[in-house]
Amino acid sequence: MELAHILESQQFAADLDGLDDFYRLAIDMEHIFESGGDPSILKGAHAVNLFSQPSTRTHASFRWAQYYLGVNIAFDSENAKDFSSESKGEVPRHTVRVHSQYCHDPRKIVIVLRHGNFKAMQEFAQYSPGAHIINAGCGKSDGQHVTQTLGDVLTIRRERPGLKRPVIAMVGDLRNGRTVRSLSYLAPRVFPETKIIFASPITLAMMPDIKEYLSRHGFVYEETFEPKDFPEVLRQADVVYMTRIQREDLAGSDLDRFEEYQLAFQLNAGNLDGIKETGLIMHPLPSNKELAPEVDDDPRAVYLTSQLHNNLLVRMAGLHTLLKPHC
Ligand code: ASP
Ligand code: CP
């Protein structure tokens, strides 16, 4: 698959053969991971990791991926919003050109970007003089987290290879979650005849643009806002994709109801038994009260195991896809 940037799920949804190639590459990366890495693979390539919002997994896994493939980390900021000139109002079209200027060949650079503003990410890509941009989680209710979704879909495929017509329940804060937005674009393309069930408090419902996309393409989805329906959602689901209520994005009465919202669609010992034996429990993490501690050790829960591993592999594959042609 030839790509200049990795920005949104639609790039992969539009090229399913390319996606299969990408996943073959990700699985090849497992050998490199298991052997402890091979620094010759992307020798001569450079990474600029710009994180303007908090991150544990995405930042760490990209750094590990860079280590395993021998990418030089030229610049790394975990708080770019405060400690880079973004805090002084520097515009994305300048930032991308500045970071690109320090290498004789900007095509050897990848900028791994986490940003609160999706348009800022688009500007990085638009004004880049050759450096490759990877969306490491950008925007919120208009945003996407495409590398998360690539890893999530790979996880479903590897964990449940025979799954046909899966019912995927997306649960929690669907309005502010960028992971579920990216997943909604890709999953119905990869899994034909899938049904998506959105389960959330009504004020945190999936945004209209995603529902319009699903309807326009004839993909099936249902919505529920009633906690009393949650057991039935769990009963139907092949994949239960839980998400955190994003406190930082709530205001007014939603903020007052933060605690209530977390518990309204909580997974716990009382309802876990309702999930199919073959069901898969996923979460992009971090989690709060929507996951009771006992869920962590359920054999169907993969958010602390293969979901993390596959996310690392797709990040290695992403770096390889963008940088290898120039190294
Ligand atoms: N870590 C994911 C993201 O950055 C999900 C979350 O923060 O709840 O989008
Ligand atoms: N899943 C995810 O993006 O986690 P972080 O926010 O910790 O990177």
Image: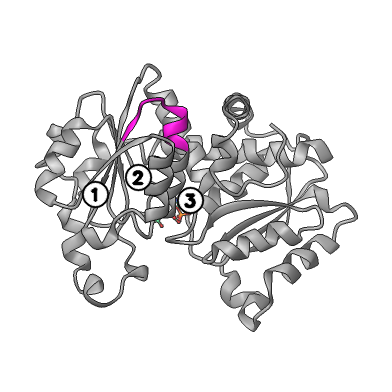
To which residue does mark 3 refer? 57
Q: Earlier in the sequence, mark 2 or mark 1?
A: 2
Residue 61 lies, in percent from the top left, at 55, 46
Residue 122 lies, in percent from the top left, at 64, 59
Q: Is residue 327 visible?
A: no
Considering the numbered disc 3 on the image, is that residue within a helix, a strand or a loop?
Answer: helix
Query: Does 110 sit above or below residue 256?
Result: above
Type of amino acid under label 1: Leu
Q: Dividing the image into 4 quarters, which one contains the N terminus?
A: top right
Type of amino acid under label 2: His
Residue in front for this viewpoint, 221 or 55: 221
Residue placed farthest to the front in the image?
216
How much space separates mark 3 and mark 2, taking CA atoms?
12 Å
How much space separates mark 2 and mark 1, taking CA atoms?
9 Å
Mark 3 or 2: the one toward you = 2
Type of amino acid under label 3: Arg
To which residue does mark 1 refer? 291
Q: Is residue 107 left or right of residue 204?
A: right
Q: Earlier in the sequence, mark 3 or mark 2?
A: 3
Residue 129 lies, in percent from the top left, at 81, 57
- Quarter where residue 69 is shown: top right
How much space separates mark 1 and mark 3, taking CA atoms?
18 Å
Query: Does 28 sit above or below residue 84?
Result: above
Q: Is mark 3 within 8 Å of ligand 2?
A: yes
Considering the numbered disc 1 on the image, is that residue within a helix, a strand or a loop?
Answer: loop
> Are dots 2 and 1 in contact, CB under 8 Å?
yes
Residue 190, magenta (yes or no): yes
Q: Residue at x 66, y 44 (%)?
A: 67
To which residue does mark 2 refer? 283
- Quarter where residue 37 is shown: top right
